[in-house]
Image (spheres, rainbow, N blue to C red):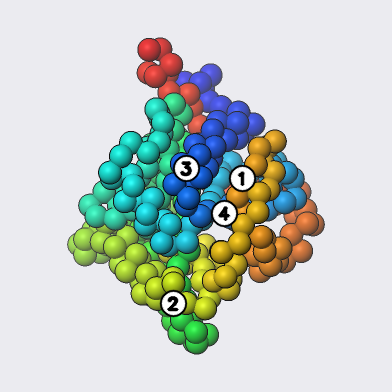
Amino acid sequence: MKKQDRLSLKEAQSALLPILEEFDRVCRLHNLRYSLIYGTMLGAIRHKGFIPWDDDIDVCMPRPDYEKLVELSKQEQLFGEHFSLTADRGKKGVYPFLKLMDDRYIVRCTNHIETPYLYVDIFPVDGLPDDRKEIEKLYRKELTASAGVVLSKWFTSEKKWGFLLWIFGFWFYLLCMCFGGTARSVRRVNKLATKYPYEGADNVGLHSWCLEHCEMPREAFDRYTEVEFEGKKFLCIEDYDLCLKNTYGNYMQLPPESKRVSQHCMRVYRNKKLQSK
């Protein structure tokens, strides 16, 4: 990739916005529930747009709506030109969640192997058991299962490893490959995440990936409002205050300047092959 083709952080943020707009269009057209989540929700509430140092967009969907999106994508051309949905299961499953990609922009990442194009992450919201001990047990199992996904990507990435960490990662990577590799790990995570059906659960969360789980009462995902994000309106759960407090604490307070950095280390480039057509 040529250095002059690389997008600045601000340009990358501008390139992400049309992906979110396309996702929003499809969800509204098919009456699918979704909400901004994680740093995107925080950015909408605190900054009315991107957190200035953030370089991605996250949304979530109740599992029934998420599955409907998957099925619709198999039956018809849901998204416009340049947009495509990744697989989250089967042999092509790379992660236990979806990504909506835009092939006009190519992504390279120093942390782990990513999808080839710029994307918005789409996480499912799944049911949780009633007992706290059972919840923690579920999280531990999911963490173990997702380790196969994470390490297989980190080991084959551009990231520089320390020697001992490299040795550990190498053998864990081989073990993961012997037991079915990334695809099997993804299937295992999905099986655990859907163990407690969304419709019958009192509490739900985003626990198909080893991030903040955003535990909330299920009814929180029945009520939505529109919030401003970069001058446009997108959907967000009404009780975003509880969600943000559970995840970030005093979320309106800015972090120290030393922590105002991107967590993804993405490099985004214009896809010159498409632009030359």
Asked which secondary structure carries label 2, the reply is helix
Residue at numbered disc 3: 29
Nearer mark to the viewer, of 2 and 4: 2
Task: Give the quadrant of residue 272.
Answer: top left
Q: Quadrant of residue 96?
A: bottom left
- What's the CA distance linking mark 3 and mark 1? 14 Å
Element at label 1 = strand
Q: Amino acid at mark 2?
A: Gly
Q: SS of the residue at dot 3?
A: helix
Q: Nearer the viewer, residue 2 or 250?
A: 250
Amino acid bearing label 4: Ser
Label 1 or label 2, whichever comes before in sequence order: 2
The kind of residue on which mark 3 rests is Leu
Crowding at dot 2, Cα within 10 Å, few <14 / some 14-19 / many 20+, comes out as few
157 or 148: nearer the eye?
148
Q: Which residue is mark 2?
A: 200
Residues under labels 4 and 1: Cα distance? 8 Å
The amino acid on which the numbered mark 1 sits, given as a three-letter code, is Phe
Q: CA distance from mark 3 to mark 2?
A: 27 Å
Sooner in the amino-acid sequence: mark 2 or mark 4: 4
The mark found on residue 234 in the picture is: 1
- Badge 1: few (under 14), some or many (20 or more) residues near its Cα, within 10 Å? many
- Image location (x, y in percent) of residue 142: 40, 70
Left or right side of 229 for 192: left
List x then y, in percent, for residue 153: 37, 51
